[in-house]
Amino acid sequence: MTSTGGQSDYGCSVNDLRNLMGYRSTKGKTKIQSDYGGTEGLCQRLKTDSVSGIPNTTEELERRRAYFGVNEIPPHTPKGFCQLVKEALKDVTLITLLVAATISLALSFYKPPDDGTGSVGSDDDKHDAGWVECFAILISVVLYVLVTALSDYTKERQFRGLQSKIEMEHKFSVIRGGTQIQVAVSELVVGDIVEIKN
């Protein structure tokens, strides 16, 4: 990554900051102390005043976004309805029902050869109506899969809507240009002095 407008690079890269974020608690403090000379040293490398923060200018904010990137997690690609149908069909019980119903349906159309006894009875009626039960099972499975996929699709859409609403409403208190202001989480940039509340 390079900075825009011919400005000199910051004293640490995106990868350096990612690695630093992997440390927690006292290990993080020790890492900042050993690699950057403490929080003041880290602020100097990030070109941030530890008291007044970064300048609150559009140019400065854009320069930091260009060099370090924006503060957002890229949204995952939403699953389509057909993909959710495929996932619903992976249920072992449904697969077993489908196989059994298909075999039973195929066998319901098979008529054994006449044994010559000429007996008339309910066996022929049962044999002729066998396909109805198989067909009912197949319809039940299809309906179950469609309802499951539709339910999952609706839940996923609601979750995405709720997530974007939370991201827009969640504000942080930061110090920019010596003034405390509220910014959305997506508007945070590397070098912001953020007020942590208990």
Image: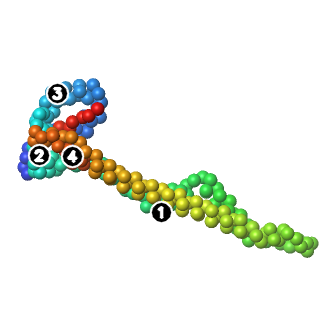
- The residue lying at 19 percent from left, 26 percent from top is 33
Q: Position of residue 16 (x, y in %)?
A: 22, 37
Q: Amino acid at mark 4?
A: Val
Whether residues under marks 1 and 3 lie with C-beta atoms below 8 angstroms apart, the answer is no
Q: Which mark is nearer the camera, 3 or 4? A: 4
Q: Which comes sooner in the sequence, label 4 or label 1?
A: 1
Q: Residues within 10 Å of mark 2 (few under 14, many from 20)?
A: some
**26 to the left or right of 86:** left
Disc 1 to disc 2, C-alpha distance:
47 Å
Disc 3 to disc 2, C-alpha distance:
24 Å
Q: Which comes sooner in the sequence, label 4 or label 2?
A: 2
Disc 3 to disc 4, C-alpha distance:
26 Å
Q: Which residue in the structure is indicated by mark 1?
A: 82
Q: Which mark is nearer the camera, 1 or 2? A: 2
Q: Amino acid at mark 3?
A: Gly
Q: Which residue in the structure is indicated by mark 2?
A: 56
Q: Which residue in the structure is indicated by mark 3?
A: 38
Q: Which comes sooner in the sequence, label 1 or label 3?
A: 3
Disc 1 to disc 3, C-alpha distance:
53 Å
**84 to the left or right of 186:** right
- When the figure is inspected, residue 175 is found, relative to residue 147, above or below; the finding is above
Query: Of helix, strand and loop, which one carries label 3?
Result: loop
Query: Of helix, strand and loop, which one carries label 4?
Result: strand
Query: Of helix, strand and loop, which one carries label 2?
Result: loop
Q: Position of residue 5 (x, y in %)?
A: 8, 51
Query: Of helix, strand and loop, which one carries label 1?
Result: helix
Q: Amino acid at mark 1?
A: Cys
Q: Which mark is nearer the camera, 4 or 1? A: 4
**2 to the left or right of 92:** left
Q: Which residue in the structure is indicated by mark 4?
A: 183
- The residue lying at 10 percent from left, 48 percent from top is 57
